[in-house]
């Protein structure tokens, strides 16, 4: 396995719960080792993810 660091854009739903973020990552076939929201706009969360591939 490799750990790939990447930035993912997720739609801003107004309430960024852990469940919401992890579900969006899973829907994109991302297996997160860790993640952090690094930027927030009115429409997008930018999430830095350590993806296990």
Image (tube, rainbow, N blue to C red):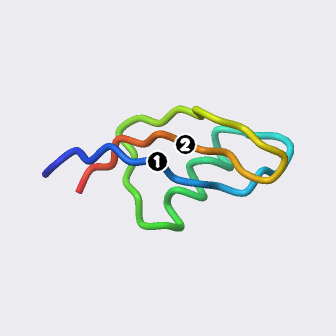
- Element carrying mark 1: strand
Q: Name the residue under label 1.
A: 7
Residue at image coords 41%, 35%: 34
Residue 38 is drawn in which quadrant?
top right
- Element carrying mark 2: strand
Mark 2 is surrounded, within 10 Å at the Cα level, by few (under 14), some (14 to 19) or many (20 or more) other residues, namely some
Question: In the rendered image of this protein, does residue 27 appear above or below residue 21?
Answer: below
Residue 46 point in image, percent of width and height:
60, 44
**Label disc, if present, on residue 48 of the rendered structure:** none
Q: How many numbered discs, if any?
A: 2
Q: Which of 20 and 43 is in front in this view?
A: 43
Mark 1 is surrounded, within 10 Å at the Cα level, by few (under 14), some (14 to 19) or many (20 or more) other residues, namely some
Question: In the rendered image of this protein, does residue 36 appear above or below residue 25?
Answer: above
C-alpha gap between disc 1 and disc 2: 5 Å
Q: Is residue 27 left or right of residue 30?
A: right
**Label disc, if present, on residue 47 of the rendered structure:** 2
Residue 21 point in image, percent of width and height:
62, 47
Q: In this view, does 39 lie to the left or right of 41?
A: left
The answer to whether the residue labelled 1 contacts the one labelled 2, judged by CB atoms less than 8 Å apart, is yes
Q: Nearer the viewer, residue 31 or 47?
A: 47
Residue at image coords 33%, 49%: 51
Residue at image coords 64%, 35%: 39
Residue 40 point in image, percent of width and height:
72, 38
Residue at image coords 59%, 56%: 23
Furthest-left residue in view? 1
Q: In which quarter of the image is the C terminus?
A: bottom left
Q: Is residue 42 left or right of residue 40?
A: right
Q: Earlier in the sequence, mark 1 or mark 2?
A: 1
Q: In this view, does 52 lie to the left or right of 34?
A: left
């Amino acid at each position: 396995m490799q750990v790939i660091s990447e930035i993912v854009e997720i739609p801003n739903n107004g309430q960024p719960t852990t469940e919401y973020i992890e579900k969006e990552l899973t829907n994109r076939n991302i297996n997160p080792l860790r993640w952090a929201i690094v930027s927030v706009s009115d429409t997008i969360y930018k999430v830095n993810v350590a993806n296990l591939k």
